Structure formats: C-alpha cells, structure tokens
Image (cartoon, rainbow, N blue to C red):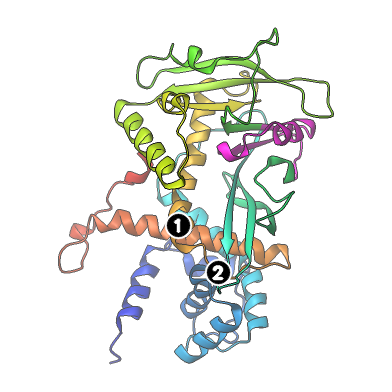
Amino acid sequence: MTKLNLADENWNYLLTLLPKDWEAQAKISGGVKRLRGAESLSSLLRTLLLHVAHGCSLRTTSVVAKTAGWASMSDVALLKKLRLCESWFQALCAGLLKESGLSVPPAHRGLRMRLVDSTVIKEPGDTGSQWRVLYSLRVPDWQCDFFRLSSAKGAGNGESLKYFSIKPGDCLLADRGFSHLAGIEHVQRCGGSVIVRLNDQSTPLEHGDGSPVVLLDWLERLVEPGQVGGLRVWLPAAKGTRTRISARLCAVRKSVEATALAERKLKRQSSRKQTVLRAATLEHSAWVVVLTTVEPELLSDTDVLEWYRVRWQIELAFKRLKSLGDVGHLPKRDAASSRAWVYGKLLIALLTEKMQRHAAAFSPWGGRWLEQDPPPEFLA
C-alpha cells in the first residue's frame, strides 16, 4: 500500500469539501469529456488549481504536474483545458454557495442582479506587472458575465461602473469604491440601476430643491440598532448632461459592537496610511448607508439592504484571497479562460471558508466530531 504524504492527505481532505457531485459535474458541464494527459479527474483539478490558486505560470504548472505525476500536458494544452473547464468551475462554485446556506432575496419584475467587484493583481517577480481586474457575477446562477483586465495604473484604469457593459434591467451591486457620479450615470443611461455603498466624498447628493443633503442630520433619526430608513435624494447632472438622477438612500443603524469594530478599523487604516481621519467619517460608521436608483415599487428599503448584504457576503469570501492569494499569472487573451480564472479564485475562496467552518468540528485526532456540520458563522 502506498503511503500518502502530507500534501496528498491535505488534497484528499480538500476533495471531501467539494459538492458531492463534483465528478459528475465535470461531464454534465462539458468541461471534461476525456482525460487526455491527466492521470485522473482529481489530478486534473489539482493541476488547474495549482495555476489558479498558487499563481504559478502555465509553464511552471505543466512542469510541476508532470514531475508529480498528476498530468502530462504542455502549457498550451493546460490553457485550453482551463478554458473548457469554465462551466465546471462555475457549477462547483454554485454548489458550494448553495451548501453555505447563503439566502438570496427574490429579484423583482425582471431585475437582473449582478455583483460587481474589482481587485489589483501583481504578478511574480521584482518587475511583475500590476493588473486591475473588473468582473461581475450574476445571481442567483452565479455566472461571470463580465471580465475586464487592464493596467492598474493610468487614466481609464480605475474602479468605475462606466467600464461595465449594461443592458436594460441590469442592477449592479457594488461597494463604495464604485460610488462615483460618472459610473452611476453610465448605468442609468443604459437602462440599468445600481445598489452601491455610499461614498459621500465622491457622490454629492441633493434634495429636490437643489440644496445639499446633510447626511448626518438624517442618519441621527435612526437611533435604534437595526432600525431601517429611506430618503429620496437627487444626484446632480454629470458632466456633459443636463438631467439629474433620481435616487434614494437606504440605511440601517449598526449594533454597538459593530459600530465599535468599524471605528477601530477606520483608525487602523488611518494610522497605516498616515492620513487624517475625518470626524464625520467616524460618526457615519454607526450606519450602513446604501445608494440605489431602483424605485421603491421594485425593491423596498429593507430589500435593498438585504441585496447589499448578499454582495457583502460574497466579498467576505474573496477577502482572504485578496490578502493572501492574489499574486499570480492571469489569463490575458480570451474571455473563457478569464472567466474560468474568476471561478477558480471563487472556488478556492469558498473552499477556504468551508474549511474554516469545519475546523470548529474537528477533534484533536483529526476526525470530525460526530460528523456534524458547524453553522455557517461567516453568514451571521
């Protein structure tokens, strides 16, 4: 009997975290019709995740996989295989998201909900290039429907909704980095809508009579933790346009504990970046404030906040990758391999979160205590 090394034991454990039908999905999705060049389906997945998760180049991945006996294929063949596995990776992500207990509120009257995010990747080496990746995931089917790769520096390469392709009925959910007038105007002009965490510094707001909105005056009316409120506002006309955009604010008062945590985070960031922390920023940290252009007839204030919560939960899954797993070679030439790369990153993030949940149920000798799944605490 062959004795497994620690790396093989860890890999076999990781396989148990995948959806139970992970092997069947490879064929159902059409990702793997033949195992040409790979020892097994497990070895093929291990090889592809070496490239996606560890940031190895395709050439390095090819050499390592051949040496380890997992697969024998060229870097070109690996790229083709990655492209073919797009739908397989997507199915695995959807399965893990379903297992996690993540509840998705129902969309209303044909709204297509798209979770938007951005990250900056630095490739290996002292002179490694920095790239900005913009992408969106459509829910509830978790399809990656947009991927844009550009330099991380220079004009036209920042975080903005104006770079996304928009169709009438799209609703983009984004964090405060995308709270810019030009991007929101682009979405509105194309027939879409937004749900975005408000950045009051980059998104000026007006009342109906044109007077500026004093945000804190309104927020202080929400005094009880969990209290939700809404306010009709207007965005001033963007450069080159004459029409103001009708919008509304949806806010919820945080708990005392969540407020204290947010304040500590802001102070740490200010100290690390050597910047002056505005008093207003600290005051606003007691509330979650979301700006939306969706009319209340389609989504209530509570619905808007619930949808933003879904977007935030997905970002939690990516946070660990943003701090630990972002370094790596990116596909730069075709859309299919780029989407597969996004799914691969999300797959690793979701497996990491599931592993974290399972850690609470491990006994000292390595087995799971009574085979009970711990609660998905990261969704609480």
Q: Amino acid at mark 2?
A: Gly
Image quadrant holding the C terminus, namely top left
Residue plotted at (57% across, 82% down) = 35
Q: Position of residue 43 (x, y in %)?
A: 48, 80
Residues 234 and 65: in front is: 234
Q: Name above or below for residue 8 compared with residue 29.
A: below
Would you name the residue on which mark 2 appears?
A: 328
The answer to if 162 sits in the magenta stretch is: no
Q: Quadrant of residue 266?
A: top left
Q: Is 60 on the left-hand or right-hand side of 166? A: left
Image quadrant holding the N terminus, namely bottom left
Q: Amino acid at mark 1?
A: Ser
Q: Quadrant of residue 151?
A: bottom right
Residue plotted at (72% across, 34% down) = 169
Residues 371 and 300: in front is: 300
Residue plotted at (47% across, 66% down) = 22
Disc number placed over residue 323 in the picture, else none: 1
Residue plotted at (70% across, 11% down) = 210
Give neighbour class at mark 1: few <14, some 14-19, many 20+ (Cα, 10 Å): few
Start-end of magenta stretch: 164-193
Taking the image as drawn, is residue 310 in sight?
Answer: yes
Q: Is disc 1 placed on a helix, strand or loop?
A: helix
Between the C-alphas of marks 2 and 1, the distance is: 13 Å
Q: Is 97 on the left-hand or right-hand side of 2? A: right
Taking the image as drawn, is residue 105 in sight?
Answer: no
Q: Position of residue 21 (x, y in %)?
A: 46, 64
